[in-house]
Amino acid sequence: MGLPVIESDSTPGLAFHLAEARNFAVRQTTGVVIVADADSVADPESIRTAIELAHSDCVVWPFIRYHYLPPEATDVEDLSTVTPIYTKPGRHSSAKLSVGGMFVTNTETYWRIGGQDDRLERTWGFEDDCFLAAAETLSTVHRVDGNLYAFAHDVEGGRDWSPKNPNYVWAEKYKRARGNRARMLALIARD
């Protein structure tokens, strides 16, 4: 889309840490930022709309439909033609909308609501749920009608959404603080 790209990783020599990698990237810029996982792309028009919205104090997810595609789809030009492994439903479903893969905000809002919580364990999962809870409590959240396409790949340690995942405990803390400004501010404090 002709936008500048900042590639980031977490601390070398340690297991990958998504929250840490995102924070490293956002520290390298100011203004509106699209935080996108390397395995995810969204509709360009939805991204443009999200960028416009993100100039104000908000966090924008530029999609309501999350399509998890087979790895070979990376070679397909029109991703809407690929049969997904699964799709998380859109706005008219009672199912939870996905918050993974990409969001747009400005750097001031990002840091004011705590950024990504790098206190989570170096394992996969729950970073986006925690960030959404902070955004809903300390800012405004928008959704743009659009598609996000994520490409299937292995994750070190696997994908675990169960209470056995140590980050589940963090997600529960954020869940309990959701909607309570004082409680959320205390939770995101790093002192």
Image: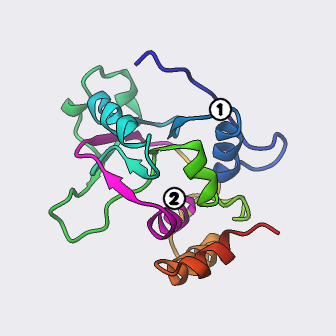
* Picture quadrant where residue 21 is located: top right
Camera-side residue of 73 and 29: 29
Direction top: furthest residue: 2
Quadrant where the C terminus lies?
bottom right
Mark with earlier residue (2, 1):
1
Residue 70 at least partly seen: no
* Picture quadrant where residue 130 is located: bottom right
Quadrant where the N terminus lies?
top left
Q: Is residue 10 left or right of residue 155?
A: right
Which region of the structure is painted magenta? 127-153
The residue where tag 2 is placed is 128
Under mark 2, the amino acid is Asp
Q: Residue at x 71, y 64 (%)?
A: 121
Residue 99: image location, x then y, percent: 41, 56
Instruction: Answer whether residue 181 is magenta in the image.
Output: no
Q: Residue at x 54, y 81 (%)?
A: 177
* Picture quadrant where residue 89 is located: bottom left
Under mark 1, the amino acid is Thr
Of labels 2 and 1, the one closer to you: 1
Q: Residue at x 77, y 66 (%)?
A: 190
Numbered circle sitting on residue 21: none
Q: Is residue 191 left or right of residue 58?
A: right
Camera-side residue of 169 and 70: 169
The residue where tag 1 is placed is 29
Instruction: Answer whether residue 134 is magenta in the image.
Output: yes
